[in-house]
Image (spheres, rainbow, N blue to C red):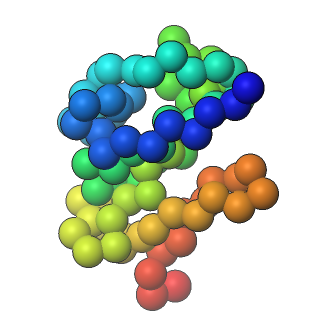
Amino acid sequence: NKTLFFTHGHVYGPGLHNSVDKWPVLPEGSALVYGHTHKKVLQEVDGHPGVTVFNPGSAGIPKDGTHSFGLYEDGVFTHRILGE
């Protein structure tokens, strides 16, 4: 009963870094994966226990200082920084 919910971040999002604060209903152990802000995120957010929030950042126009992309492998989210 886990869900990976992918969205751009302007209709649904966690309310971080200028993303909209509108959540889908997600069971514990799920993830909200979004873009829009061009800033890397990997965390839980207050009020949504057990839900991982992930933003891969941006390879082309980063707004947090590093060009990045995200990976999801074997149930784990990670960031990769280009040039490292």
Q: Quick check: 59 above or below 4?
A: below
Q: Quick check: 39 above or below 5?
A: below
Q: Observer-nearest residue: 84 or 9?
A: 9
Asked if residue 5 lies left or right of residue 14, the reply is right
Splitting the image into 4 quarters, where does residue 21 fall?
Answer: top left
Asked if residue 29 lies left or right of residue 52, the reply is right
Question: Considering the image in quadrants, where does the N terminus appear?
Answer: top right
The image shows residue 6 at horizontal and vertical percentages of 45, 43
Splitting the image into 4 quarters, where does residue 8 fall?
Answer: top left
Q: What is the residue that sits farthest to the right in this orientation?
A: 74
Camera sees residue 11:
yes
Asked if residue 10 lies left or right of residue 56, the reply is left
Asked if residue 78 lies left or right of residue 34, the reply is right
Circle count: 0
At 51% from the left and 63% from the top, the residue drawn is: 70
Q: Quick check: 57 above or below 24?
A: below
The image shows residue 17 at horizontal and vertical percentages of 27, 38
Q: Observer-nearest residue: 7 or 83?
A: 7
The image shows residue 30 at horizontal and vertical percentages of 64, 31
The image shows residue 75 at horizontal and vertical percentages of 74, 50
Q: Quick check: 65 above or below 35?
A: below
Splitting the image into 4 quarters, where does residue 16 fall?
Answer: top left
At 44% from the left and 57% from the top, the residue drawn is: 56
Q: What is the residue that sits farthest to the top in this orientation?
A: 47
Camera sees residue 43:
no
